[in-house]
Image: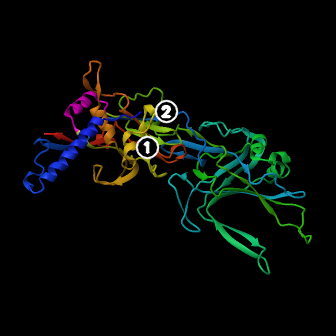
């Protein structure tokens, strides 16, 4: 659980209250304003940036990747982070139970439509979310869709290394190449309700991955299926079609993000031998299979870091020495790449600061985006910083106290500024305001010891070890390379903790 120094906050409030009282009492005595506080004791202020910090990259073996509304598909050879590939398994559901397909139904066509995650600006252009397309969308990739040979239980948790076996003869869409396009897709249909001649209606849908699936598979497994399989979703998913696996056989291209539950569709268009009242053949009809977010889905991620930055692979090695931290740190949600941040690692420095008895007015931890981050994809729009030790303790509060008290001020968003960093050059950075967290470290807590005396007790474990992660979690394909804590050639590039304090002169 988080703890913080009530004594520090109480002291700060007391000083603030007394300050207001003094300023109010001296409203007509301009020469006394600011001359002193607390019975004439003078206070000065300062900024401290020299805190010893250690930062390095860590990796989780696997991350929870089930239950998300977003599914990732594709592959990209990242020059910094190495190769990353994503496939996913997802369950299909019936749009109508016990459907009647008529006499001798036959599949006419099966169309799968998956809109790209983004916001349409007009009929022909789209602005994509930061995490929507990761890599080179100009390179075509192959896609293969097969029947899943595994039941995904809705009450189970699945991880990013979950195996997604496929049925050998369950090919829904054979390996085929597709090329991304940002253009809207024109469609048409015949309006038979018009007076007089039939009218062709033309309309557009958002840019999408749109595929024509295998007729035979849906003829055998839907139109000609044993009717008992189509009675309800539980029987359909458990005993008939467990789900579909979307995969790629390409080695480079891009990773695409889809919200399968918003406007995605799989429509089976079919004909039968039935006729209308006048004996005319019925036009083709459609039956939909749905992607329902009440059912299971899981993303699977695979990585090959043989061509990744040497500093990244070095930090992920089992024998990496974390004592001094690294020159660079690397974050990516779907890869489980995070950073351990250790504050106040110099005990002598920490003891000296504590003896100064500062009143902490503001403390901000600033992470600079590296000039070598690359232009492949924008860095994550936001990062999250949490208590490191709490992540492995069931029921513990992972949130830093400043996030609890003032989540808006805690921040963590990607910023760009020319003033906060040296050189007066526009730089990108992430900033976290952790005033209360730092005050806890420097002030400790006042507790009663065994002798009945009060003393200041410092927690040298809970407060100094924090973790930096992607805010978007396991579905965030964006990544960021940032300056770490051990750039021996130029220490001004390192991440830093900036403490604004007041102290008695």
Q: In this picture, is 88 found above or below 51?
A: below
Circle 2 packing at 10 Å, graded few (<14), some (14-19), many (20+), is: few
Badge 2 marks a residue whose secondary structure is loop
Residue neighbourhood size for the residue with mark 1, other residues' Cα within 10 Å, grouped as few (<14), some (14–19), many (≥20): some
Image coordinates for residue 218, horizontal then vertical, percent: 80, 51
Tell me where the magenta segment starts and ends, as one range.
Answer: 344-358
Q: Which residue is mark 2?
A: 395
Q: Main secondary structure of the magenta part?
A: helix
Q: Total of numbered circles in the picture?
A: 2
Instruction: Give the left or right position of residue 304, taking residue 10 as reference.
Output: right
Question: Quarter-wise, where is residue 181 in the image?
Answer: bottom right
Up-down: is 434 above or below 113? above
Q: Residue at x 48, y 30 (%)?
A: 393
- Whether residue 157 is visible here, answered yes or no, is yes
Give the colour scheme shown.
rainbow
Q: Position of residue 267 (x, y in %)?
A: 74, 57
Q: Percent position (x, y) of residue 15?
A: 20, 43
Q: Which numbered disc flags the more N-terminal residue, 2 or 1? A: 1
Report whether residue 135 is seen: no
Determine whether, in the image, residue 500 is placed left or right of residue 280: left
Quadrant of image for the N terminus: top left
Q: Quadrant of residue 67?
A: top right
Q: Inspect the magenta stretch and tell me whether residue 263 lies in it.
A: no
Which type of secondary structure does the marked residue at label 1 adopt? strand
The residue indicated by pointer 1 is: 384
Numbered disc in front, either 2 or 1: 2
Is 454 left or right of 200, judged from the image as shown?
left
Q: Which mark is residue 47?
A: none
What is the distance, in whole Å, between disc 2 and disc 1 at their CAs? 19 Å
For the C terminus, the quadrant is top left
Q: Residue furthest bottom?
A: 196
């Amino acid at each position: 659980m988080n703890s913080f120094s009530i004594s520090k906050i109480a002291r700060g409030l007391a000083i603030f209250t007394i300050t207001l009282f003094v300023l109010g009492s001296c409203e007509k005595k301009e020469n006394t304003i600011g001359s002193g506080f607390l019975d004439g004791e003078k206070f000065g202020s300062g900024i401290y940036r020299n805190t010893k910090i250690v930062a390095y990259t860590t990796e989780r073996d696997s991350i929870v990747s089930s239950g998300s509304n977003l599914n990732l598909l594709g592959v990209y050879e990242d020059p910094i982070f190495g190769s990353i590939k994503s496939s996913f398994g997802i369950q299909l559901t019936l749009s109508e139970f016990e459907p009647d397909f008529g006499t001798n139904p036959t599949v006419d066509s099966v169309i799968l439509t998956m809109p790209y995650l983004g916001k349409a600006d007009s009929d022909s252009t789209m602005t994509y979310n930061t995490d929507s397309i990761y890599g080179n969308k100009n390179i075509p990739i192959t896609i293969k869709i097969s029947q899943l040979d595994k039941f995904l239980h809705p009450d189970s948790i699945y991880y990013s290394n979950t195996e997604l076996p496929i049925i050998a003869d369950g090919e829904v869409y054979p390996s085929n190449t597709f090329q991304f396009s940002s253009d809207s897709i024109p469609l048409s249909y015949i309006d038979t309700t018009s007076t007089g001649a039939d009218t062709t209606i033309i309309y557009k849908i958002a840019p999408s991955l749109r595929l024509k699936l295998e007729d035979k598979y849906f003829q055998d497994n839907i139109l000609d299926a044993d009717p008992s399989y189509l009675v309800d979703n539980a029987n359909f998913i458990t005993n008939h079609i467990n789900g579909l696996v979307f995969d790629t056989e390409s080695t480079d291209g891009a990773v695409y993000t889809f919200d399968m539950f918003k406007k995605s569709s799989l429509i089976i268009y079919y004909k039968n031998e039935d006729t209308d009242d006048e004996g005319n053949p019925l036009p083709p009809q459609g039956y939909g299979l749905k992607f329902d977010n009440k059912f299971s889905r899981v993303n699977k991620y695979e990585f090959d870091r043989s061509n990744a930055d040497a500093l990244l692979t070095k930090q992920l090695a089992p024998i990496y020495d974390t004592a001094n931290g690294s020159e660079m740190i690397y974050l990516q949600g779907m890869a489980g790449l995070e950073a351990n941040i250790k504050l106040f690692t110099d005990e002598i420095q920490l003891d000296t600061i504590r003896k100064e008895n500062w009143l902490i007015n503001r403390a901000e931890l600033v992470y600079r985006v590296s000039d070598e981050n690359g232009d492949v994809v924008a860095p994550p729009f936001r990062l999250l910083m949490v208590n490191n030790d709490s992540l492995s303790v069931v029921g513990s509060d992972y949130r830093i106290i400043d996030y609890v008290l003032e989540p808006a001020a805690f921040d963590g968003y990607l910023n760009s500024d020319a003033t906060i960093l040296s050189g007066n050059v526009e730089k990108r950075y992430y900033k976290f305001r952790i005033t209360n967290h730092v005050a806890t470290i420097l002030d400790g807590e006042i507790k009663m010891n065994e002798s009945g005396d009060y003393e200041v007790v410092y927690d040298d474990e809970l407060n100094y070890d924090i973790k930096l992660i992607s805010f978007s979690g396991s579905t965030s394909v964006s990544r960021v390379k940032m300056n770490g804590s051990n750039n021996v050639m130029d220490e001004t590039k390192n991440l830093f903790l900036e403490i604004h304090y007041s102290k008695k002169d």
